[in-house]
Amino acid sequence: MGKLDITESFIYRHRYVIGYGLIAIGLIAVLLFAGLYLPGGISAAEMQSVVKSDSISLVDFNSLAVTNLPYHLLQQVTLSLFGVTILGIKLPSIILAFLSAVGIVLLLRKWFKPSVGVLASLIAITTGQFLFIAQEGTPGVLYLFWAVWLIYLATLLTTNIRFKAPVKFAFFVIAALSLYTPLSAYMLIAMLTAFILHPHLRYLIRQLSRPKLIIGAILGIILITPLIFATVKNLGLGLELLGIPTKLPDFTANFMSLGAQYLGFFKPGGTTLMTPFFELGSMMLIGIGLFRIFHTIAAAKSYIVLIWILCLIPVVIFNPGFTSIVFLPMVLALTYGLGFLLSYWYKLFPLNPYARIGGLIPMVILVTVLVFSGVDRYVYGYRYDPGLVPNFSEDIKLIPKDTSYLVVSANEKPFYDVLAKHNKMLTVTTIPQSSGFLATREAKKPYSGYQIGQILTTHNTNDGDRLYLYKKITD
């Protein structure tokens, strides 16, 4: 029997093209599906984001001094193009999630072996947490976007590449814009600390052109000028950016929340974001990865990840609601764990092709299960979970196109005022007008001289009655 040479097979020779092709196809499919169909509605946080985006004016310097300014400017553009619709609200997150996923693929390919990077990328972009932040029309996706591209660009700066000057300027631009997002400063602090303390990183930084670094730093300062003035005028904004609470939090509740987010395998749930974020198999790989990071602490990459995790531990204890900020460190730890398992198996059988292939079979099964179970869990959770589904409103899709008057509650009015701004035929008010009007569920009550003529509903079992069409009572 001839010796099996797997390197001559078509699949082996084109394995990375096939792998990244599958990632691209799957990514586009899941982003479109998650963005347009599931959960299929918008949350209260997304409504607040729309109001904040609409309030920004490029001619008003003070309006630019807000957190997550880059995201809200992008959302303002999509709202002007598509109106206050599901697509208009969520498109910024879909775009940034796609770019984040591309960054994850590039980063993992740069840091790890291509085979490990492909498998880890597939797991990362099919987790429920990634799919959720990819479709949620809020700035939550920025925590992943900034972190991925900052680390990837910093990695490029420490390698021999062409066109290093544009990469430097891109790094400073992204670093400056990331400061508009709360807690992003800790990513920069971790990187700066690693560059100062690690001897190899110090050596690499010394090789960079100082004049270009100074120019990049000046460009970054210009970009955060509105934020600097706003922070000086309002110290509370600075505390918000650093994630420092104004009063001592309930640590017991925070630890219980963190436990549910990462270890609540036997009692899954959540309100808008499904918990636990990672499945049991992924968390086991993350645990192995953390052990591997500690074991290889002398390596520059492990050093950066460890310092970053140490910086984030007190941050997430004080702010358990900022869940997206820890997504990338967890993905990196997962990749370390996956790479360790593969390399350990190959070391056991360095020359036996049958054993090497046999070892890949359970690994492929594990990754396949994690990928499909992640998508399956997301789909069914946001369609049927009674704790998740009611938190997403489909009201803007139910409003008939010929509606002239919409009565809302005082709490809802800021959001629906933005809706009316993009729909000139619609008038939003808190009191009845004309011979008929449409009222939201919160605004439903007896109105003198009117009666309910029609109820618009959704498919939800609970709170399915959403809008009420009132007609004037005629004698």
Image (tube, helix red, strand yellow):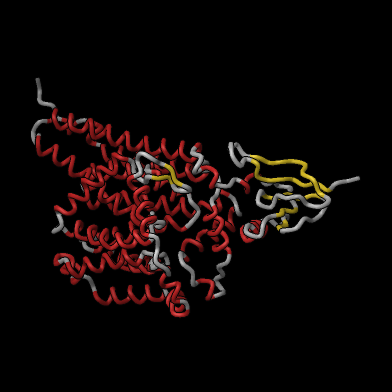
127 is higher (above) or lower (below) than 49: above
Q: Give me the residue at 18% from left, 65% from top.
A: 201
**Residue 32 point in image, percent of width and height:** 48, 43
Q: Looking at the image, can residue 179 be seen?
A: no
Q: Quadrant of residue 174?
A: bottom left
Tally the numbered discs: 0
Q: Quadrant of residue 203?
A: bottom left
Residue extending farthest right:
475
227 is higher (above) or lower (below) than 273: below
Q: Quadrant of residue 312?
A: bottom left
323 is higher (above) or lower (below) than 29: below
**Residue 1 point in image, percent of width and height:** 9, 19
Q: Give me the residue at 13% from left, 59% from top.
A: 298
Give the position of the C terminus as an image quadrant. Answer: top right
Q: Give me the residue at 37% from left, 45% from top.
A: 276
Left or right of 65? Residue 280 is: left
Residue extending farthest top:
1
Left or right of 42? Residue 21 is: left
**Residue 306 point in image, percent of width and height:** 22, 58
Left or right of 396? Residue 146 is: left
